[in-house]
Image (cartoon, rainbow, N blue to C red):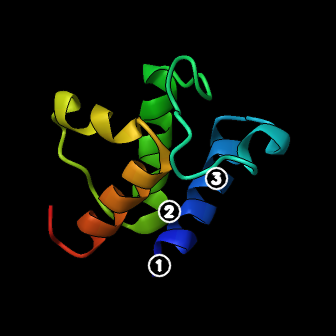
């Protein structure tokens, strides 16, 4: 699985689970901010997306919120985390 594959699936989760419009999600670049002034995700959106990612990729994240919230800064960071967890590196 490549980073591009992961990004495509994460974008689909944003559309389906967070009910964001495809017009807002599809053009997002890897470094586009996902929180606050960027896409505007809040902590509840992140939790919902996290559950969706765990389900979609068959992985489990550590429960330490301080640790995983930093990975929601952009699609690049989030997709790299998914790949690392899938590969057992985290």
Looking at the picture, does residue 87 appear above or below residue 48? below
Q: Position of residue 5 (x, y in %)?
A: 56, 73
Q: Is residue 11 left or right of residue 77?
A: right
Q: Is residue 10 above or below residue 67?
A: below
Disc 2, SS: helix
Which residue is located at x 15 percent, y 69 percent? 89
Camera-side residue of 8 and 30: 30
Disc sitting over residue 82 in the figure: none
- Residue of label 1: 2
The residue sitting at the bottom extreme is 1
Disc 2: which residue:
56
Q: Which is more foreground, mark 3 or mark 2?
A: 3
Earlier in the chain: of badge 1 and badge 3, it is: 1
Q: Label 3's element?
A: helix
Label 1 with label 2: CB-CB less than 8 Å: no
Give how far apart the Cα atoms at labels 1 and 2 are.
Answer: 15 Å
Residue at 42% x, 58% y is 79
Task: Measuring from the top left, give residue 47's x and y in whole percent.
Answer: 42, 32
The picture places residue 74, in percent across and down from the top left corner, at: 47, 42
Classify residue 20 by image quadrant.
Answer: top right
- Numbered label tally: 3
Q: CA distance from mark 3 to mark 2?
A: 12 Å
Give residue 27's position: percent from left, percent from top.
75, 49
Q: Is residue 54 left or right of residue 19?
A: left
Work out how far the residue at label 1 is from the one at label 3, CA to CA, in angstroms.
Answer: 14 Å
Answer few, some or many: residues within 10 Å of disc 1's Cα (few below 14, many 20 plus, some between 14 and 19): few
* Circle 1: element type: loop
Q: Give the residue at mark 3.
A: 11
Q: Residue at x 62, y 50 (%)?
A: 29
């Amino acid at each position: 699985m490549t980073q591009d594959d992961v990004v495509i699936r994460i974008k689909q989760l944003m559309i389906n689970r967070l009910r964001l419009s495809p017009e807002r999600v599809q053009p997002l670049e890897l470094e586009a901010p996902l929180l606050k002034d960027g896409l505007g995700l809040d902590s509840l959106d992140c939790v919902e997306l996290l559950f969706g990612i765990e389900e979609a990729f068959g992985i489990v994240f550590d429960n330490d919120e301080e640790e995983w919230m930093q990975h929601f800064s952009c699609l690049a960071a989030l997709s790299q985390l998914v790949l690392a967890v899938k590969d057992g590196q985290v």
